[in-house]
Every structure is written in C-alpha cells, then in structure tokens.
Image: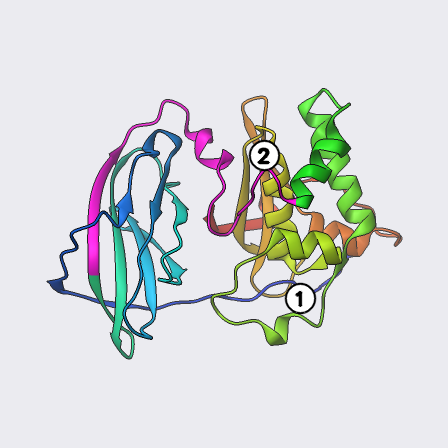
C-alpha cells in the first residue's frame, strides 16, 4: 500500500544575473576563513528594501539562497565537491534581474568531503545551547554506536512529532526552518523534520545531509535526510515514517534510493 501525502513546497527561483556592474566594498563581505570546513559566511547590511540573494556556483552547477542583508552573518556550504567556486552576493535590480554586490572565487580542496555536513548553516542552523541540541545530548548520551544513535533519534521523532498540514499554505518562498520552534511545537513540514534531525546529529559529529527533491511516497517537492555510516550514505525519511507510524503500513527506517530523486543537498 502506498500513502500519498503532500509534505513539501517547491522553491523555484529563476534569476537573470546582470554581470555588468560589480559594486566594490571596502570591508570583507564573503568570509572564507572556515574554508577547511567546506563553508563560507556572508555578512552585509543593505541600505534599502531591496531583495538580496546568495549565489554559490561551481562550473555549471549553482545554488541560490535567500539572504536578509541585515548585518547578521549567515553560513553556506560548498557541497558540490572540490574545485573552484564563485560566491556572489546579489541585489535585485527589478523584476528577475540581479546584479553582483560583490563576489569571491575560492578553490576548495577537502581531504574528507563529509566535513561539509557537520556544520551549522543557513537551513540547518543550530547552536550548542539550543534546547533541541541539549535534548539530543541527553537522549543519546548513553548510546555508543552511531547506528544506534540514528535509530534512537529517528524513533523519537516518528513517535512524537506530527506533520503540520496547515503550515504549507502560509509559507513564503524563502522559508527557512527554525529547529527551536520545531522542537517546541513537535510538529512541522518535511523541511522542519529534516533540519531538526540533521542539526542534532551534526552537533554530535555525525555527518548528515538535508536533501530536497522528490519521493514516490510524496506528492510534490519534498525534504529528507541522508546519514553517513561506515563509509556509505543512507536515506532516512522521518516525515513519511511519522505519518505511517501506528498504521498497518510496513516500512523500513532506511529507504531505497530508487524511491528518491535528489535535486539539492545541504
């Protein structure tokens, strides 16, 4: 039996980037001091109400992120493998056109690519003092094996969390999960589940991806996790399984890759 549920929203952004003008800044906007972790940070204060975006590009691949331009530093992953990246801060100049505020080119050379998935980033954002992170420490403190840690947190989430069917219609295109709100309410959409699961495990040194794409179990755009164990990535979908928990549907914690189509991972 297949259960179809709508658990995600499509965040599709088509941007026309105007490269004719680059505004030089005296201060450093793009911080590459943590490049050995596979991340960059950007801080900028906009002087108007313009919309800003961050572009991370490597060759023909590119990922575009929302950016608040309120002076608060935000961190972004370089998850497309080793090589030369262009990091750009973009400002909307009207319609779908954007111009570079600034850009920076870096050459990423990591010995271990999984280090990228240990960080606190824009959409998997956590701090050691956050309530869900402290809860994770308590929940998993007596669990020694990594596989057992994954199973313990997964079981807790599918039993205790509820999918928030009322949230989708209220979401803005640039929605970013807040793990503290998700933990306090113990409900959310797939994006919330995946950010919470990744944040708790990353804080304890286990590489976990937040993945966006499509699943045969879900109608529409979806988010799930991949965990790195014994040299291999395993697909795990706590959102789907929490809706199946308590029903007569039979399911496994680790999913078949044939049932999932990845678009982005973070």
Upstream in the sequence, badge 2 or badge 1?
1
User: Residue 141 location in percent, x, y?
Assistant: 74, 26
Please determine whether, in this image, residue 84 is positioned above or below residue 184: above
Where does residue 178 sit, x and y in percent of width and height? 59, 55
Q: Is residue 166 visible?
A: yes
Residue depicted at x 62% and y 51%: 179
Quadrant in the picture for the N terminus = bottom right
Q: Nearer the viewer, mark 2 or mark 1?
A: 2
Residue at x 35% of width, y 62% of height: 69
Q: Is residue 258 above or below residue 95?
A: above
Query: Toward which corner of the image does residue 13 lie, by quadrant?
Result: bottom left
Question: How many residues crowd around disc 2 within 10 Å: few (fewer than 14), some, or many (20 or more)?
Answer: some
In the figure, is residue 67 to the left or right of 30?
right
Q: Could you tell me how many numbered marks the image carries? A: 2
Q: Which residue is mark 2?
A: 203
Q: Is residue 109 left or right of residue 169?
A: left
Using the image, determine if residue 130 lies above or below residue 143: below
Q: Is residue 105 magenta?
A: yes
Q: Position of residue 34 (x, y in %)?
A: 35, 34
* Image mark for residue 6: 1
Residue drawn 39% across and 40% down? 79
Q: Quadrant of residue 35?
A: top left
Depth check: 104 or 8 in front? 104
SS for tag 2? helix
Range of the magenta residues?
101-130
Q: Is residue 253 visible?
A: no
């Amino acid at each position: 039996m297949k259960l179809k549920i709508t658990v995600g929203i499509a965040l599709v952004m088509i941007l026309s980037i105007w490269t004719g003008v680059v505004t030089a800044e005296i201060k450093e906007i793009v911080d590459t001091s943590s490049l050995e972790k596979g991340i960059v940070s950007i801080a900028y204060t906009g002087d108007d109400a313009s919309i800003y975006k961050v572009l991370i590009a490597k060759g023909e691949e590119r990922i575009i992120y929302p950016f608040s331009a309120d002076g608060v530093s935000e961190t972004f992953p370089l998850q497309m493998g080793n090589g030369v990246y262009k990091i750009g801060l973009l400002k909307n100049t009207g319609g779908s056109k954007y111009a570079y505020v600034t850009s920076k080119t870096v050459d990423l050379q990591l010995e271990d690519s999984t280090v990228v998935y240990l960080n606190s980033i824009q959409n998997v954002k956590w701090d050691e003092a956050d309530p869900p992170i402290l809860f994770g420490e308590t929940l998993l403190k007596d669990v020694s094996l990594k596989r057992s840690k994954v199973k313990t947190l997964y079981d807790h989430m599918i039993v205790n969390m509820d999918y928030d069917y009322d949230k989708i219609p209220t979401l803005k295109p640039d929605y970013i999960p807040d793990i503290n709100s998700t933990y306090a309410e113990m409900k959310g959409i797939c994006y919330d589940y995946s950010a919470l699961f990744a944040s708790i495990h990353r804080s304890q040194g286990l590489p976990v991806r937040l993945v966006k794409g499509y699943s045969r179990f879900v109608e529409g755009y979806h988010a799930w996790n991949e965990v790195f164990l014994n040299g291999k990535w395993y697909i795990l979908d706590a959102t789907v399984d929490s809706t199946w928990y308590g029903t007569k549907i039979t399911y496994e914690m680790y999913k078949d890759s044939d049932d999932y189509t990845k678009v982005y991972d973070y």
